[in-house]
Image (cartoon, rainbow, N blue to C red):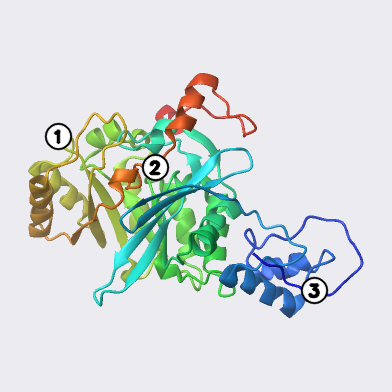
Amino acid sequence: MTSVSDIPATSPAPGPRPDPLSSTSPEFVEACGRVSGVARGGEARRAYRAFHRDGVVPAGTEPRLHPVGRREIEGETIKFTLTLPDGLETESVLIPMRRRDGSLTRTLCVSSQVGCAMGCRFCETAQMGLVRHLATADIVAQWHAATHQVGHRPKNIVFMGMGEPTDNLDAVIPAIRILADHDGPAIAASNISVSTVGNPEGIRRLGELAAEPGFHRLNLAVSLNAPNDAIRAEIMPVDRAWPMDDLMDAMLAWPGRPKSAICVEYVLIPGVNDGPEHCDEVCAYLKPLRCSLNVIPYNPRRDSPWPAPTEDSVDAFLGRAIANGQFTKRRGTKGRDVMAACGQLGNPEIRRRRRVGGQEAGGTPIDISIRATDA
Ligand code: SF4
Protein backbone atom coordinates (compact mmCIF):
# COMPACT_ATOMS: atom_id res chain seq x y z
CA MET A 1 0.00 0.00 0.00
CA THR A 2 1.15 3.54 -0.65
CA SER A 3 0.51 6.81 1.13
CA VAL A 4 -1.07 9.97 -0.16
CA SER A 5 1.79 12.46 -0.39
CA ASP A 6 0.06 15.74 -1.08
CA ILE A 7 -1.22 16.29 2.44
CA PRO A 8 -1.02 19.92 3.55
CA ALA A 9 1.21 20.42 6.58
CA THR A 10 -0.66 21.84 9.57
CA SER A 11 0.20 22.41 13.18
CA PRO A 12 0.00 19.29 15.36
CA ALA A 13 -3.13 18.63 17.36
CA PRO A 14 -3.87 15.74 19.70
CA GLY A 15 -6.78 13.39 19.21
CA PRO A 16 -7.62 10.03 17.70
CA ARG A 17 -6.55 9.52 14.10
CA PRO A 18 -9.42 9.23 11.61
CA ASP A 19 -10.17 5.68 10.45
CA PRO A 20 -11.75 5.32 6.99
CA LEU A 21 -12.78 1.77 7.91
CA SER A 22 -15.07 2.95 10.70
CA SER A 23 -16.43 6.15 9.15
CA THR A 24 -18.69 7.12 6.30
CA SER A 25 -17.13 9.76 4.04
CA PRO A 26 -18.91 12.71 5.78
CA GLU A 27 -17.78 11.34 9.17
CA PHE A 28 -14.23 10.91 7.86
CA VAL A 29 -14.10 14.45 6.45
CA GLU A 30 -15.43 15.77 9.74
CA ALA A 31 -12.87 13.76 11.75
CA CYS A 32 -10.05 14.97 9.50
CA GLY A 33 -11.07 18.54 10.28
CA ARG A 34 -10.39 17.94 13.96
CA VAL A 35 -6.79 16.67 13.73
CA SER A 36 -3.61 17.84 12.10
CA GLY A 37 -1.47 16.21 9.44
CA VAL A 38 -4.36 14.92 7.34
CA ALA A 39 -6.14 16.14 4.24
CA ARG A 40 -9.21 18.34 4.72
CA GLY A 41 -12.51 19.02 2.98
CA GLY A 42 -12.64 17.84 -0.62
CA GLU A 43 -9.09 16.53 -0.33
CA ALA A 44 -10.13 14.32 2.59
CA ARG A 45 -13.07 13.02 0.58
CA ARG A 46 -10.76 12.12 -2.31
CA ALA A 47 -8.37 10.42 0.12
CA TYR A 48 -11.30 8.40 1.52
CA ARG A 49 -12.29 7.36 -2.00
CA ALA A 50 -8.71 6.41 -2.91
CA PHE A 51 -8.45 4.31 0.26
CA HIS A 52 -11.55 2.27 -0.50
CA ARG A 53 -11.24 2.13 -4.29
CA ASP A 54 -7.47 1.77 -4.70
CA GLY A 55 -6.19 0.72 -1.27
CA VAL A 56 -4.16 3.92 -0.77
CA VAL A 57 -3.86 4.64 2.96
CA PRO A 58 -4.30 8.41 3.62
CA ALA A 59 -1.33 9.88 5.49
CA GLY A 60 -2.05 10.65 9.13
CA THR A 61 -4.92 8.16 9.43
CA GLU A 62 -5.05 4.85 11.27
CA PRO A 63 -7.24 2.35 9.44
CA ARG A 64 -7.80 -0.79 11.48
CA LEU A 65 -6.37 -3.06 8.79
CA HIS A 66 -5.49 -6.65 9.66
CA PRO A 67 -3.21 -9.12 7.89
CA VAL A 68 -4.76 -12.00 6.00
CA GLY A 69 -4.06 -15.20 7.93
CA ARG A 70 -5.16 -18.56 6.58
CA ARG A 71 -6.40 -18.78 3.01
CA GLU A 72 -8.15 -21.95 1.80
CA ILE A 73 -9.37 -22.49 -1.71
CA GLU A 74 -11.87 -24.98 -3.12
CA GLY A 75 -12.46 -24.45 -6.81
CA GLU A 76 -13.29 -20.75 -7.10
CA THR A 77 -14.45 -20.44 -3.46
CA ILE A 78 -11.92 -18.71 -1.21
CA LYS A 79 -12.16 -18.75 2.57
CA PHE A 80 -9.78 -16.37 4.36
CA THR A 81 -9.16 -15.18 7.87
CA LEU A 82 -7.97 -11.84 9.23
CA THR A 83 -5.75 -11.95 12.29
CA LEU A 84 -6.99 -9.45 14.89
CA PRO A 85 -4.60 -7.67 17.28
CA ASP A 86 -5.73 -9.91 20.17
CA GLY A 87 -4.89 -13.08 18.25
CA LEU A 88 -8.50 -13.92 17.38
CA GLU A 89 -9.59 -14.05 13.78
CA THR A 90 -12.47 -13.21 11.50
CA GLU A 91 -13.56 -15.68 8.82
CA SER A 92 -14.86 -14.59 5.44
CA VAL A 93 -15.75 -16.47 2.28
CA LEU A 94 -15.62 -15.24 -1.32
CA ILE A 95 -18.28 -17.19 -3.17
CA PRO A 96 -18.24 -17.24 -6.99
CA MET A 97 -21.49 -16.52 -8.80
CA ARG A 98 -21.60 -17.43 -12.47
CA ARG A 99 -23.95 -15.18 -14.50
CA ARG A 100 -26.05 -16.41 -17.40
CA ASP A 101 -23.62 -14.75 -19.83
CA GLY A 102 -20.77 -16.79 -18.31
CA SER A 103 -19.11 -13.89 -16.48
CA LEU A 104 -18.10 -14.32 -12.88
CA THR A 105 -19.02 -12.13 -9.90
CA ARG A 106 -18.25 -12.74 -6.26
CA THR A 107 -20.29 -12.52 -3.11
CA LEU A 108 -18.45 -11.87 0.14
CA CYS A 109 -19.83 -13.56 3.24
CA VAL A 110 -18.67 -11.54 6.26
CA SER A 111 -18.54 -12.28 9.98
CA SER A 112 -20.08 -9.91 12.51
CA GLN A 113 -18.74 -11.65 15.64
CA VAL A 114 -16.02 -14.10 16.62
CA GLY A 115 -18.11 -17.14 17.45
CA CYS A 116 -21.82 -16.85 18.15
CA ALA A 117 -24.09 -17.03 21.19
CA MET A 118 -27.17 -18.39 19.44
CA GLY A 119 -26.38 -22.08 19.80
CA CYS A 120 -27.97 -23.46 16.60
CA ARG A 121 -27.28 -27.18 16.79
CA PHE A 122 -26.50 -27.62 13.10
CA CYS A 123 -23.89 -24.85 13.03
CA GLU A 124 -20.12 -25.10 13.42
CA THR A 125 -19.79 -21.53 14.70
CA ALA A 126 -22.18 -22.28 17.55
CA GLN A 127 -19.68 -24.80 18.88
CA MET A 128 -17.33 -21.89 19.71
CA GLY A 129 -19.90 -19.94 21.71
CA LEU A 130 -19.58 -16.17 21.59
CA VAL A 131 -15.99 -15.03 21.93
CA ARG A 132 -16.55 -11.36 21.17
CA HIS A 133 -18.26 -8.82 18.95
CA LEU A 134 -16.42 -7.38 15.97
CA ALA A 135 -16.06 -3.62 15.68
CA THR A 136 -17.44 -1.78 12.64
CA ALA A 137 -13.91 -1.44 11.25
CA ASP A 138 -13.31 -5.20 11.62
CA ILE A 139 -16.38 -5.87 9.47
CA VAL A 140 -15.48 -3.35 6.76
CA ALA A 141 -11.87 -4.59 6.89
CA GLN A 142 -13.10 -7.95 5.57
CA TRP A 143 -14.35 -6.20 2.40
CA HIS A 144 -11.12 -4.22 2.15
CA ALA A 145 -8.98 -7.35 2.50
CA ALA A 146 -11.04 -9.26 -0.08
CA THR A 147 -10.67 -6.39 -2.53
CA HIS A 148 -7.11 -5.22 -1.94
CA GLN A 149 -5.27 -8.22 -0.44
CA VAL A 150 -7.05 -11.31 -1.72
CA GLY A 151 -7.67 -9.48 -4.99
CA HIS A 152 -11.37 -9.98 -5.70
CA ARG A 153 -13.74 -7.02 -5.42
CA PRO A 154 -17.09 -8.45 -4.28
CA LYS A 155 -20.30 -7.42 -5.98
CA ASN A 156 -22.50 -8.56 -3.11
CA ILE A 157 -22.14 -8.69 0.65
CA VAL A 158 -23.99 -11.15 2.86
CA PHE A 159 -23.84 -11.05 6.64
CA MET A 160 -23.90 -14.83 6.96
CA GLY A 161 -20.45 -15.58 8.34
CA MET A 162 -19.63 -16.11 11.99
CA GLY A 163 -22.04 -14.48 14.40
CA GLU A 164 -25.59 -13.21 14.59
CA PRO A 165 -25.71 -9.70 13.04
CA THR A 166 -28.68 -8.56 15.14
CA ASP A 167 -26.66 -9.39 18.26
CA ASN A 168 -24.15 -6.70 17.22
CA LEU A 169 -26.25 -4.10 15.40
CA ASP A 170 -24.34 -1.18 16.91
CA ALA A 171 -21.40 -2.28 14.75
CA VAL A 172 -23.32 -3.88 11.85
CA ILE A 173 -25.56 -0.91 10.95
CA PRO A 174 -22.63 1.56 10.70
CA ALA A 175 -20.75 -1.06 8.65
CA ILE A 176 -23.66 -1.26 6.20
CA ARG A 177 -23.65 2.55 5.90
CA ILE A 178 -19.91 2.51 5.08
CA LEU A 179 -20.17 -0.39 2.62
CA ALA A 180 -22.95 1.47 0.79
CA ASP A 181 -21.14 4.85 0.85
CA HIS A 182 -20.80 6.25 -2.70
CA ASP A 183 -17.30 7.50 -1.92
CA GLY A 184 -16.39 4.21 -0.24
CA PRO A 185 -17.02 0.61 -1.32
CA ALA A 186 -20.21 1.86 -3.06
CA ILE A 187 -22.11 -1.41 -2.78
CA ALA A 188 -25.78 -0.86 -3.57
CA ALA A 189 -28.10 -1.68 -0.67
CA SER A 190 -29.85 -4.11 -3.02
CA ASN A 191 -26.60 -6.08 -3.09
CA ILE A 192 -26.33 -6.29 0.70
CA SER A 193 -28.15 -9.00 2.68
CA VAL A 194 -28.38 -9.37 6.42
CA SER A 195 -29.20 -12.83 7.69
CA THR A 196 -30.69 -13.21 11.13
CA VAL A 197 -31.57 -16.12 13.33
CA GLY A 198 -34.96 -14.43 13.76
CA ASN A 199 -34.63 -11.78 16.44
CA PRO A 200 -37.85 -9.71 16.08
CA GLU A 201 -36.39 -6.63 17.75
CA GLY A 202 -33.28 -6.83 15.56
CA ILE A 203 -35.47 -7.12 12.45
CA ARG A 204 -37.35 -3.99 13.55
CA ARG A 205 -34.08 -2.06 13.99
CA LEU A 206 -32.84 -3.19 10.60
CA GLY A 207 -36.25 -2.21 9.22
CA GLU A 208 -35.66 1.36 10.41
CA LEU A 209 -32.50 1.41 8.30
CA ALA A 210 -34.35 -0.12 5.33
CA ALA A 211 -36.95 2.66 5.63
CA GLU A 212 -34.27 5.34 5.03
CA PRO A 213 -33.66 6.76 1.55
CA GLY A 214 -30.96 4.75 -0.21
CA PHE A 215 -31.55 1.61 1.85
CA HIS A 216 -35.03 0.60 0.64
CA ARG A 217 -33.71 -2.42 -1.13
CA LEU A 218 -31.59 -3.77 1.69
CA ASN A 219 -32.21 -7.51 1.79
CA LEU A 220 -33.33 -9.44 4.84
CA ALA A 221 -32.76 -13.17 5.21
CA VAL A 222 -34.27 -15.09 8.10
CA SER A 223 -33.11 -18.51 9.28
CA LEU A 224 -36.34 -20.42 9.87
CA ASN A 225 -35.23 -24.04 9.48
CA ALA A 226 -38.35 -25.62 10.95
CA PRO A 227 -42.08 -25.86 10.33
CA ASN A 228 -43.16 -25.31 13.94
CA ASP A 229 -41.89 -24.15 17.32
CA ALA A 230 -41.43 -27.67 18.69
CA ILE A 231 -38.91 -28.68 16.02
CA ARG A 232 -37.37 -25.23 15.83
CA ALA A 233 -36.69 -25.08 19.56
CA GLU A 234 -34.93 -28.45 19.28
CA ILE A 235 -32.40 -27.20 16.75
CA MET A 236 -32.48 -23.44 17.47
CA PRO A 237 -32.65 -22.57 21.18
CA VAL A 238 -33.56 -18.96 20.29
CA ASP A 239 -37.04 -20.13 19.38
CA ARG A 240 -37.85 -20.32 23.09
CA ALA A 241 -37.22 -16.58 23.38
CA TRP A 242 -38.48 -15.59 19.92
CA PRO A 243 -41.27 -17.95 18.82
CA MET A 244 -42.42 -18.15 15.23
CA ASP A 245 -45.57 -16.01 15.72
CA ASP A 246 -43.45 -13.09 16.94
CA LEU A 247 -41.03 -13.70 14.11
CA MET A 248 -43.86 -13.60 11.56
CA ASP A 249 -45.12 -10.26 12.99
CA ALA A 250 -41.64 -8.79 12.59
CA MET A 251 -41.27 -10.11 9.03
CA LEU A 252 -44.70 -8.77 8.04
CA ALA A 253 -43.61 -5.31 9.27
CA TRP A 254 -40.41 -5.32 7.17
CA PRO A 255 -40.53 -2.11 5.09
CA GLY A 256 -38.41 -3.21 2.12
CA ARG A 257 -39.84 -2.73 -1.34
CA PRO A 258 -41.57 -5.72 -2.94
CA LYS A 259 -38.48 -6.34 -5.07
CA SER A 260 -36.48 -7.07 -1.96
CA ALA A 261 -38.81 -9.74 -0.66
CA ILE A 262 -37.61 -11.53 2.44
CA CYS A 263 -35.51 -14.63 1.93
CA VAL A 264 -36.50 -17.38 4.36
CA GLU A 265 -33.69 -19.87 4.83
CA TYR A 266 -34.42 -23.51 5.53
CA VAL A 267 -31.50 -25.80 6.26
CA LEU A 268 -32.74 -29.25 5.29
CA ILE A 269 -31.63 -31.78 7.91
CA PRO A 270 -32.33 -35.48 7.37
CA GLY A 271 -34.85 -36.91 9.84
CA VAL A 272 -35.40 -33.54 11.52
CA ASN A 273 -37.29 -31.19 9.19
CA ASP A 274 -37.29 -32.80 5.74
CA GLY A 275 -40.58 -34.74 5.71
CA PRO A 276 -43.51 -33.97 3.37
CA GLU A 277 -45.62 -32.94 6.36
CA HIS A 278 -42.88 -30.50 7.38
CA CYS A 279 -42.88 -29.03 3.89
CA ASP A 280 -46.67 -28.52 3.93
CA GLU A 281 -46.56 -26.96 7.38
CA VAL A 282 -43.79 -24.49 6.56
CA CYS A 283 -45.54 -23.45 3.33
CA ALA A 284 -48.75 -22.80 5.30
CA TYR A 285 -46.80 -20.73 7.84
CA LEU A 286 -45.28 -18.61 5.07
CA LYS A 287 -48.58 -18.02 3.21
CA PRO A 288 -49.18 -14.46 4.55
CA LEU A 289 -45.66 -13.37 3.67
CA ARG A 290 -44.19 -12.34 0.33
CA CYS A 291 -40.97 -14.32 0.49
CA SER A 292 -38.63 -16.71 -1.18
CA LEU A 293 -38.04 -20.04 0.55
CA ASN A 294 -34.34 -20.80 0.21
CA VAL A 295 -33.67 -24.48 0.82
CA ILE A 296 -30.10 -25.20 1.93
CA PRO A 297 -28.97 -28.83 2.02
CA TYR A 298 -27.36 -29.32 5.44
CA ASN A 299 -23.56 -29.07 5.44
CA PRO A 300 -22.37 -31.39 8.24
CA ARG A 301 -20.36 -29.56 10.88
CA ARG A 302 -17.52 -31.27 12.73
CA ASP A 303 -18.88 -34.14 14.89
CA SER A 304 -22.30 -33.67 13.34
CA PRO A 305 -25.10 -35.98 14.56
CA TRP A 306 -26.71 -35.77 11.11
CA PRO A 307 -25.46 -36.54 7.61
CA ALA A 308 -26.02 -34.35 4.57
CA PRO A 309 -29.41 -34.96 2.92
CA THR A 310 -29.62 -37.08 -0.21
CA GLU A 311 -30.24 -35.40 -3.54
CA ASP A 312 -33.56 -37.25 -3.79
CA SER A 313 -34.80 -35.86 -0.48
CA VAL A 314 -33.76 -32.32 -1.45
CA ASP A 315 -35.55 -32.63 -4.79
CA ALA A 316 -38.66 -34.06 -3.12
CA PHE A 317 -38.82 -31.16 -0.62
CA LEU A 318 -38.28 -28.54 -3.33
CA GLY A 319 -40.86 -30.08 -5.62
CA ARG A 320 -43.48 -30.28 -2.89
CA ALA A 321 -42.90 -26.65 -1.80
CA ILE A 322 -43.29 -25.44 -5.38
CA ALA A 323 -46.43 -27.56 -5.79
CA ASN A 324 -47.74 -25.85 -2.65
CA GLY A 325 -47.42 -22.52 -4.47
CA GLN A 326 -44.44 -21.33 -2.48
CA PHE A 327 -41.71 -19.52 -4.43
CA THR A 328 -38.74 -21.76 -3.63
CA LYS A 329 -35.06 -21.87 -4.54
CA ARG A 330 -32.24 -24.19 -3.74
CA ARG A 331 -28.98 -22.73 -2.53
CA GLY A 332 -25.99 -24.34 -4.23
CA THR A 333 -23.38 -25.88 -1.94
CA LYS A 334 -19.94 -24.36 -2.32
CA GLY A 335 -16.85 -24.75 -0.17
CA ARG A 336 -17.95 -27.82 1.79
CA ASP A 337 -14.47 -29.37 1.62
CA VAL A 338 -12.72 -26.38 3.25
CA MET A 339 -15.43 -25.88 5.91
CA ALA A 340 -16.47 -22.69 4.14
CA ALA A 341 -20.04 -23.67 3.36
CA CYS A 342 -23.08 -22.30 5.16
CA GLY A 343 -22.98 -23.10 8.88
CA GLN A 344 -19.41 -24.42 8.74
CA LEU A 345 -17.38 -21.37 9.82
CA GLY A 346 -15.54 -21.49 13.10
CA ASN A 347 -12.06 -22.21 14.31
CA PRO A 348 -11.76 -25.51 16.22
CA GLU A 349 -8.48 -24.32 17.76
CA ILE A 350 -10.18 -21.33 19.43
CA ARG A 351 -12.96 -23.67 20.52
CA ARG A 352 -10.43 -26.05 22.09
CA ARG A 353 -8.63 -23.20 23.85
CA ARG A 354 -11.97 -21.99 25.22
CA ARG A 355 -12.72 -25.38 26.67
CA VAL A 356 -9.36 -25.41 28.39
CA GLY A 357 -9.02 -21.84 29.63
CA GLY A 358 -12.40 -20.17 29.31
CA GLN A 359 -10.73 -16.89 28.33
CA GLU A 360 -8.72 -15.88 25.30
CA ALA A 361 -5.28 -14.44 25.98
CA GLY A 362 -5.38 -10.70 25.37
CA GLY A 363 -9.02 -10.73 24.31
CA THR A 364 -12.24 -9.53 25.77
CA PRO A 365 -13.35 -11.85 28.58
CA ILE A 366 -15.57 -14.54 27.16
CA ASP A 367 -19.23 -14.78 27.91
CA ILE A 368 -19.47 -18.56 28.20
CA SER A 369 -23.25 -18.52 28.51
CA ILE A 370 -25.43 -19.14 25.51
CA ARG A 371 -27.80 -16.26 26.06
CA ALA A 372 -30.54 -17.44 23.79
CA THR A 373 -30.54 -20.82 25.48
CA ASP A 374 -30.99 -19.17 28.82
CA ALA A 375 -33.95 -17.15 27.67
S1 SF4 B 1 -26.47 -20.44 12.36
FE1 SF4 B 1 -25.91 -18.28 12.58
S2 SF4 B 1 -27.06 -17.64 14.41
FE2 SF4 B 1 -27.04 -19.88 14.46
S3 SF4 B 1 -25.24 -20.38 15.73
FE3 SF4 B 1 -24.58 -20.36 13.57
S4 SF4 B 1 -23.74 -18.29 13.24
FE4 SF4 B 1 -25.01 -18.24 15.10
Q: Is residue 295 left or right of residue 6?
A: left
**Spot occupied by residue 66 in the image (x, y as percentages of width and height):** 60, 51
Q: Residue at x 48, y 64 (%)?
A: 151
Q: Is 100 situated above or below 253? A: below
Residue with the mark numbered 1: 271
**Spot occupied by residue 1 in the image (x, y as percentages of width and height):** 64, 64
Q: Quadrant of residue 374?
A: top left
Q: Identity of the amino acid at label 1? A: Gly
For this rendering, which residue is in front, 267 or 50? 50
Quadrant of the displayed image that contains ligand 1: top left
Residue 313 appearing in the image: yes
Residue with the mark numbered 2: 345
Mark 2: is the Cβ under 8 angstroms from ligand 1? yes
Q: Is residue 170 left or right of residue 305?
A: right
Binning the other alpha carbons within 10 Å of mark 3 as few (below 14), some (14 to 19) or many (20 upward) gives: some
Q: Quadrant of the C terminus?
A: top left
- Label 3, secondary structure: give it: loop
2 or 1: tag closer to the N-terminus: 1
3 or 2: tag closer to the N-terminus: 3
Binning the other alpha carbons within 10 Å of mark 1 as few (below 14), some (14 to 19) or many (20 upward) gives: few
Residue farthest along the right direction in this orientation? 11
- Name the mark nearer the viewer: 2 or 1: 2
For this rendering, which residue is in front, 324 or 367? 367
Q: CA distance from mark 3 to mark 2?
A: 42 Å
